[in-house]
Amino acid sequence: MSKVLRIYVDSPPRLDQPLDYVLRDKRAKVLRRGRGSGQELKSLARSLELVLPPGMATVTEARIPSVSASRRQAVACSAVEPMCLSPIEQVWVACAPAGSSGMSELAWTERTPLRALGEQARQIGLPISAVYAWSAAHEQDRQGLSQTVMMPACSLLMPDMASTGGSSVLRQGVWWTLAALLSWTLVLQQQAQTVRTQMRQVQVQMEQAVRQALPHLPVIVAPLTQARQHRDALLAEKSPASAPFDRLLMASAVQWPDLQGQVRALNFKDQQLALSLASELPVQPLSAESELEWKQGESPRQWEIGFAKATPPATQQGAQR
């Protein structure tokens, strides 16, 4: 069972003297009451709540605008400053979440005595988890008038008051940062997977559209480029000129079927087909009957493909001589 030790601090606030305490469970039910010094009480529980003496802290309610967590502390300080007798820089302000009425509980106290109290707890080895301002309800809890204790909404615990010092706060911050990074990584991976799926769907839709518009094409290698080439040919009324392009593209697709889906850029000029591929592909040697010839471009991903030039037979060469 998780136990929490609540100590009622007297004035002046010191933890090395006998103090009233209440040992409760996580449901605020009282398990034991008694009195002892901080050194004697540190073995009772791993979590400690301090209740400050009367007059050391002030509690009120105010309507705090809905702002981000990073700005909430500054807004709370602005709300407290007109009610505070000390400069706001010397005061530690705590703000609880808004209740059902829309009002938030505010508590503030001087930083110096609060930090000194945390230093005493650190020297004794008391693990402080919350610091509460005094109220009439705490007086009833201290006198044992109820079997449960009040659970205030606002804690004045400063980040450097834990018994483990700043390292605990630092570790907590590191874990939260790592958790945030992991969450963002998962979100980005999910978005990247969605984009890849959408790209594949668009690619399939493009190929289907080209097949419907140009049913005479047996192989779709680069949908946009093939459609553009045919469009340009039709607009220029030079449809016969597209025949070499079609024949060269079809022969290349038959010779190298791995080109399917690998072409990222395609250009047809001077009876030569220039291809830019997404990755390097192994090129199989051309058969003797092939009408194609190819050569490597400026990089392993660039090919230049054309028709082989006809070579006159040897007999014709001898007759010409």
Image (spheres, grey):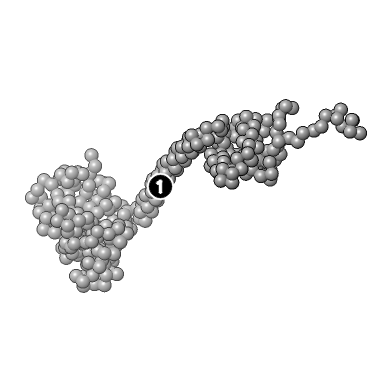
Q: Dividing the picture into quarters, in which one does residue 58 lie?
A: bottom left
Which three-letter amino acid code belongs to the residue tagged 1? Trp
Q: Is residue 249 left or right of residue 207?
A: right
Question: Secondary structure under badge 1?
Answer: helix
Rendered residue at 8%/50% (across/down): 145
Residue 194 image point, x, y percent: 42, 41
Q: Quadrant of the N terminus?
A: top left
Question: Is residue 71 at all visible to an observer of this figure?
Answer: yes
- Position of residue 123 in the picture relative to residue 295 (left or right): left
Report x, y in % for residue 308.
73, 35
Which residue position holds label 1?
A: 184
Eyeballing the image, is 296 above or below 216?
A: below
Which residue is the extreme one toward the left?
A: 145
- Residue 59 visible in image: no
Q: Which of the pair 88/214 is nearer the observer? A: 214
Quarter where residue 283 is shown? top right
